[in-house]
């Protein structure tokens, strides 16, 4: 079938791949760019997905890309086709050369395509392979659902659905690709998978579980796939061992755990939003550029500051800003100093039903005052 390239106006020819199931006669056809080995394997892959299963045996005509040497007794199949058959768990065979009786079903399917589909599309103009396949699809469905002359009341599709569908083998979770390799790997405790000498990040929640790993040498990408449903969890670029492990990816971490990997700048931004400018000024001086503990100190500063009322903490910040150097120990000392003069004033915790809960200071719960209180009561 011909189609016209919009870019340069040249006329291209699409090749039609045709396949058929041997019992029901269910026909499949699709347009491809040519008859290269990749086109043939892509056509068979689409055929299996159209059939929603894999046949026990796959017989093909002696196409040069898939059959190196046609022979009546011992044909030599291309390595790629043999690998393809192993991947899909089907036995590949080439028909006896020069004997059309070994491929009568598919020859009839080609004739059906020409009569029922090609003749309807010859007068139409197409501008891509995709347009041709979109036009073929409804006509193919009509052909497979048409009533059979020799079997009134049944069609190719009804025979396939009733008697042949359950005999097909299940499809693999991942489509075959000549440029890719699929393997299984266990997720390590640090939410990473090791391939060779390189570690790659995967989403949280899969530690200790096996994931399918698809390495595509053509696109230079690695995909991590959930074997239970075939869902692609994440895709990343292949790294060289000299580049080291893949850096931590925040997009793979749940929202409520992202604070664990926040850097200094992100923590400072969060402090400014949640605690205000005064706290931000203190935090900036607390997190010195040369301070290797900056992130840890900022997390502690944020956590402790959120426990107290705002006006209480403003007094703490005021004490700190008077100092030339601010350290985390100095922050704790200032907090303790204001507590002694002002008393402990924690924020009121809001409960689910809208009420609030007063939180009292319980750090000296086993002191003398505690037992005196108990004795009085």
Image (cartoon, rainbow, N blue to C red):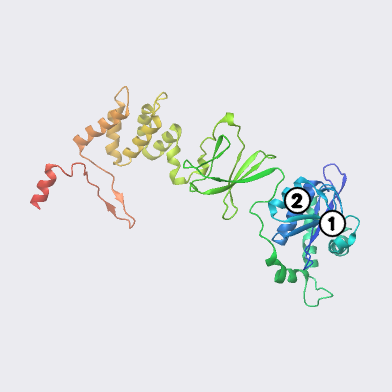
Please name the residue that numbered disc 2 is placed on: 42
Q: Position of residue 249 (x, y in %)?
A: 52, 39
Judged by depth in the image, the label closer to the viewer, 2 or 1, is 1
In the image, 42 versus 79, the foreground residue is 79
Does 257 appear above or below 318?
below
Please name the residue that numbered disc 1 is placed on: 95
Q: Position of residue 275 (x, y in %)?
A: 36, 38
Q: Mark 2–mark 1 contact, CB under 8 Å?
A: no
In the image, 39 versus 366, the foreground residue is 39
User: Residue visible at 72% across and 50% down?
Assistant: 84
In the image, 376 versus 177, the foreground residue is 177
For label 1, the SS is loop
Does 266 appear above or below 31?
above
**Within-10-Å neighbours for mark 1: few <14, some 14–19, many 20+:** some
**Which numbered dot is residue 35?**
none
Residue 168 in which image quadrant: bottom right
Q: Position of residue 80 (x, y in %)?
A: 75, 46
Residue 273 in which image quadrant: top left
Task: Judge from the rendering whether residue 335 lies leftward or rightward of residue 182; answer left or right.
Answer: left
Q: Is residue 211 visible?
A: yes
User: Residue visible at 23% across and 34% down?
Assistant: 336
Q: Position of residue 123 (x, y in %)?
A: 89, 58
- Closer to the chain start, of discs 2 and 1, is 2
**Within-10-Å neighbours for mark 2: few <14, some 14–19, many 20+:** some
């Amino acid at each position: 079938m011909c189609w016209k390239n919009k870019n340069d106006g040249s006329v291209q020819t699409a090749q039609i791949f045709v396949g058929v199931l041997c019992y029901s006669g269910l026909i499949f056809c699709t347009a491809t760019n040519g008859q290269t080995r990749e086109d043939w394997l892509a056509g068979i892959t689409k055929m299996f997905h159209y059939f929603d299963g894999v046949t026990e045996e796959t017989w093909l005509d002696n196409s040069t890309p898939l059959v190196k040497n046609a022979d009546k007794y011992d044909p030599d199949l291309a390595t790629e086709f043999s690998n393809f058959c192993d991947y899909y768990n089907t036995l590949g065979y080439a028909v006896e050369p020069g004997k059309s009786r070994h491929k009568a079903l598919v020859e009839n399917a080609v004739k059906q395509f020409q009569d029922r589909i090609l003749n309807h599309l010859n007068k139409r103009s197409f501008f891509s392979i995709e347009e041709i396949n979109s036009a073929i699809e409804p006509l193919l469905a009509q052909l497979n659902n048409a009533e059979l002359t020799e079997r009134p009341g049944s069609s190719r599709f009804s025979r396939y659905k009733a008697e042949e569908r359950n005999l097909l083998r299940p499809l693999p979770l991942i489509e075959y690709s000549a440029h890719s390799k699929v393997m299984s790997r266990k997720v390590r405790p640090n939410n990473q998978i090791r391939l060779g000498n390189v570690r790659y990040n995967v989403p949280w929640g899969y530690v200790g579980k096996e994931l399918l790993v698809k390495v595509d040498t053509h696109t230079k990408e690695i995909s991590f796939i959930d074997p239970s449903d075939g869902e692609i969890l994440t895709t990343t670029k292949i790294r060289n061992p000299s580049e080291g492990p893949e850096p931590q990816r925040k997009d793979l971490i749940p929202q409520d755990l992202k604070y664990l990997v926040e850097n200094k700048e992100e923590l400072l931004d969060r402090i400014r939003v949640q605690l205000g400018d005064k706290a931000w000024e203190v935090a900036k001086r607390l997190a010195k550029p040369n301070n290797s503990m900056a992130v840890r100190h900022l997390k502690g500063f944020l956590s402790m500051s959120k426990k107290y009322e705002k006006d209480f903490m403003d007094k703490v910040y005021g004490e700190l800003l008077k100092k030339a150097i601010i350290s985390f120990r100095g922050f704790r000392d200032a907090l303790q100093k204001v507590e002694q003069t002002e008393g402990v004033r924690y924020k009121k915790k809001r409960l689910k039903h809208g009420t609030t809960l007063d939180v009292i200071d319980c750090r000296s719960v086993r002191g003398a005052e505690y037992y005196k209180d108990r004795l009085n009561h």
